[in-house]
Image: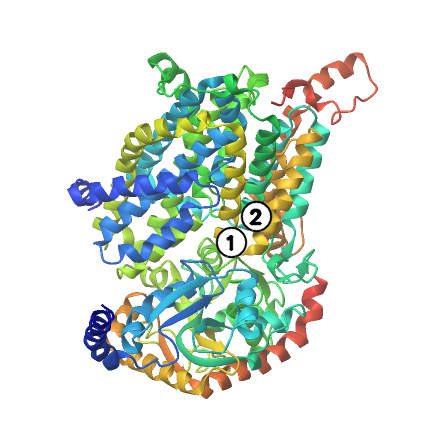
Amino acid sequence: MRMTIVAVLAATTAIITPAFAQDASYSAADEINVMQGFKAGGGSDALAQLVQPFLAEELGVNFVNQYIPGATGAIAWTQLAKQTRPDGATVSITNTPMLTTNYIMNPSITYTVDEITPIANVVTDPGVAVVAKDSPFKTFEDFVKAAKDNPGTITVGNSGVGGDDFFTSLIFEKAAGVKLQKVPFEGDGPSWTAAMGGKIDASFTNVGVAYPQVKEGNLRALAVFTEKRLPELPDVPTARELGYELVAGSSRGYSGPGDFPEEARQQFIDGLRRVTENPKFQDAAKAQAMNIDFIAGDKYRDFLKKQEAEYTQLWNDIKDEIKAQ
Amino acid sequence: MPESFLWIGLANVVDPVNLLAIFAGALIGMFVGAMPGLSATMAIALLLPLTYSMRPETGLSMLASLYLAAMYGGSVAAILLRTPGTPAAAATVLDGYPMAQKGQAGKALGLSLTASLIGGIISSIVLLTVAPLLGRIVLNFGPVEIFAVAVLGITIIGSLSQGSAILGLLSGAIGLLIATVGMDPTTGTPRFTFGVLDLFGGVNFTVALIGLFSIPQAIRLIVQGNSNENERVSSIRDRMLPTGSEFLKMLPNSVRSGFIGVFVGLIPGTGGDTASWFAYNEAKRFSRHKAEFGTGYPAGIVAPEAANNAVVGGALIPTISLGIPGSSSTAVLLGGLMVHGILPGPSLMTEYGDVTYTLLWAVMFANIALFIVGLLFTRACITVTKIPNRVVGPIIVVLSVIGSFAINNSVFDVGLMIAFGMIGFVFDQARIPTPPLVIGLILGPILDTTLQQSMLIGRNNWMVFLQNPISATLLAIALLSILQATPLFGAIARRFRNPPGADTISSAESDIAGNRD
């Protein structure tokens, strides 16, 4: 009797193992928990749903999404930094700039980038300045001039205090030496909608969300905040070519808890790299207006640390003014 | 061009696979809606990955049907258990539960189902005909206008303060105060969070709602025991659907509430939870039997139920005509479009017109599917009233714990739910009405955010609200609404005879008297 069981076991293992050995390039776990600091159906989830089916195949693992929304992601990231065991079985989707601005702006949020292990950034949605189609601002220069002539009166929407567009506005104010009237909304949608309806003068938002309206002519893009012009918006200048040092956007990638096993990290990175090079994945990303921006390993850490330093400085410069409002 | 899409959409939707998807969506939606804490948004988000493998129109038809059915499903628990299954069904509790207690649970559910059908059909017709025109209206609603809508909403507190206006205002004020917990929308400063991260995002409205309604009800059922069994039993064979004359009587109310629902759904940031209260309030305002509201009066069920189903169509208008999500559920639906390579935006009506019009027809057919599924499912639900109180009570508590946990996967929220349950219990004992608190919780965050945004836009000049024609009109209506709830108009007439000023606020209960329970 016992012999049969062993035999059956041996037989099944024999069948299963080769299939596994071929795929299993992730040695730390068979199942990876992905903590998301936002609700199902949001931007983080969109990334998870896009990447994980491909990555599961590359790594030979199952992904289990765990939604822990609250405090713009801070609940999930605090858990990642303080409570998650670094065994390779749990990672989290990390969004910038919220990952760093959360604790820069709020002393009660105590995790830092140093307590997590950045794995890789996957996508970046670049920033863009948009106005209504009938706006008097035809070019970015018109907008800057108006902001210079009327300090503190040109209303510019952003997706919320602490979000990427808010900090983009701060960087722009510094770079151009102007003062804007920044109006925070709850997310990108309400911000560009208000610009489209002429409720505010302009909106700093992201290409991925505003592109359909720009394409249709309901919104006019004045400038994109990227290194080079974007292929989908070839006529829109970058802020850099107009002389403003402004490259910004919102990025999403994966990070693990502090002291994440080095081997697992490397395997995860290799898997992600193969995914981002897969033409099928690239097509799927393009269909969802996701701009692949693969930054792996220590480069991702440097990217986060640089952003942390920059945003800490910016916030310290203006926090008293904001709180006084 | 749009005409041809209209027929392509219709042809697509009657495909057996799509019809099956619509029925499946209605079934799931009804179940999800009936469970406190499980919301349509959550179900759509969870089912979304399953629809990836389907054709876009099939997947979307199922999700749209689910969204619609959840709106009705919420009323099942509201009527039978005094526990709203979804926030949009909170207003249905006021008259639905008393009616069930009179042994007319079947009739109450039938009214809710019929009203849902009427509301849903109205909104589908609007969607199929004038959606692109109405879509432009959305752009006229910026922070200033939405603030005025919220102010108008706050005046509903006046008519919900059964018994005492002072206690009603107290309750509403507490709701508004609780709504300020969390990060300030314009400065990011945490308010009343005591350093607790879980409170940074504010008090979750659905969590609060589950606690406020269900825990006091569970306690009541357990304390009561089975003493009043005779009173509570409703016959399953009870006639559910209204008779022809009843139907004609409820028609004006449903149509009015349906249009309120479409309009409120259209405005970004407001949804079924707000619309149902607006509709309830208007039904009461237009009724000659104001005192009967809250005692199991049919119009009090018809109004919120017609409105919350009509919201589905209203919320889809900006979504399909402009690509602006009108509610959190439609935001997730938009995500579903993107997966199929359809970028939400103005091209939905042109380039992807076939898929879009299929979705719109699916909403129409979903109403009928909902009606059929509802008739079958609801009969079975009425048996709940046959279960002894001491069994139902603990089950409500268990459902509430699961529901409040499921929203954010947070144990903290379970504690919060219980805390709100205690508040609800104390309110009940002190005869303080709970609905104004709910209104405060719903509208508080909207008021807070839009007020601050308006002040930024208007450079700290309060005149910004009066210089804008839409908001000035809405605020004027709000003022009239407040005055109407007070005996001021009567007092002015009296003042000619009797000069010294009458206190207008403290005697406001005169025309809104009505007994609780």
Count of all numbered marks drawn on residues in the image? 2
**Residue B1: horizontal and vertical position, in percent?**
19, 46
Looking at the image, the residue that sits furthest to the right is B500
On the image, numbered disc 1 is attached to which residue?
A: A199
In the displayed structure image, the side of residue B126 where residue B409 appears, left or right: right
**Residue B349: horizontal and vertical position, in percent?**
27, 50
> Where is residue A287, by image quadrant?
bottom left
At label 2, which amino acid type do we have?
A: Val
In the displayed structure image, the side of residue B28 where residue A19 appears, left or right: left
Q: Secondary structure at mark 2?
A: helix
**Residue A304: horizontal and vertical position, in percent?**
51, 81
The chain carrying label 2 is B
Are the residues at dot 1 and dot 2 in contact (C-beta closer than 8 Å)?
A: yes
Same chain for marks 1 and 2? no
Q: Is residue B277 visible?
A: no
**Could you classify mark 1 by the number of other residues whose Cα lies within 10 Å: few (under 14), some (14-19), or many (20 or more)?**
many
Q: Which mark is residue B44?
A: none
**Residue A210: horizontal and vertical position, in percent?**
39, 63
Q: Is residue A110 visible?
A: yes
At label 1, which amino acid type do we have?
A: Lys
> Where is residue A105, by image quadrant?
bottom right
Rounded to the nearest angstrom, the CA distance separating label 1 from label 2 is 9 Å
